[in-house]
């Protein structure tokens, strides 16, 4: 059986995974705390939109090429 201290790459992988988990937990806590302190922001602003309507007669060439 190998000695655990000689397997340095296993310790390196475990340390990397632990640091990634710690960074993820810290980032989610900071995001959660900042979200509670800020007032809610409206995600969609209400802007008037222009609507263009094009009427097509049954005798027009555009209608005959579509159908």
Image: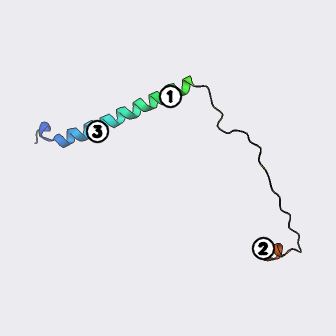
Furthest toward the top, the residue is 37
Quarter-wise, where is residue 44 in the image?
top right
Left or right placement of residue 63 versus residue 26 in this view: right
Left or right placement of residue 32 versus residue 22 in this view: right
Q: Earlier in the sequence, mark 3 or mark 1?
A: 3
Q: Nearer the viewer, residue 52 or 34?
A: 52
Q: Which residue is mark 2?
A: 66
Left or right placement of residue 8 versus residue 14 in this view: left
- Residue drawn at 30 percent across, 35 percent down: 18
Q: Earlier in the sequence, mark 1 or mark 2?
A: 1
Distance (Cα) linking label 1 and label 2 = 54 Å
Left or right placement of residue 62 versus residue 45 in this view: right
Q: Which residue is mark 3?
A: 16
Residue 29 x, y percent position in the rendering: 45, 28
Q: Above or below — where is 4 with respect to 57?
A: above
- Residue drawn at 77 percent across, 44 percent down: 48
Q: Which residue is mark 1?
A: 32
- Residue drawn at 85 percent across, 67 percent down: 56
Q: Label 2 neighbourhood size at 10 Å, few (<14), some (14-19), many (20+)? A: few
Q: Label 1 neighbourhood size at 10 Å, few (<14), some (14-19), many (20+)? A: few
């Amino acid at each position: 059986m190998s000695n655990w201290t000689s397997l340095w790459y296993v310790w390196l992988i475990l340390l990397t995974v632990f640091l990634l988990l710690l960074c993820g937990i810290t980032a989610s806590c900071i995001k959660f705390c900042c979200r509670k302190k800020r007032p809610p922001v409206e995600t969609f602003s209400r802007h008037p939109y222009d609507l263009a309507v094009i009427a097509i007669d049954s005798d027009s060439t555009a209608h005959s090429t579509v159908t």
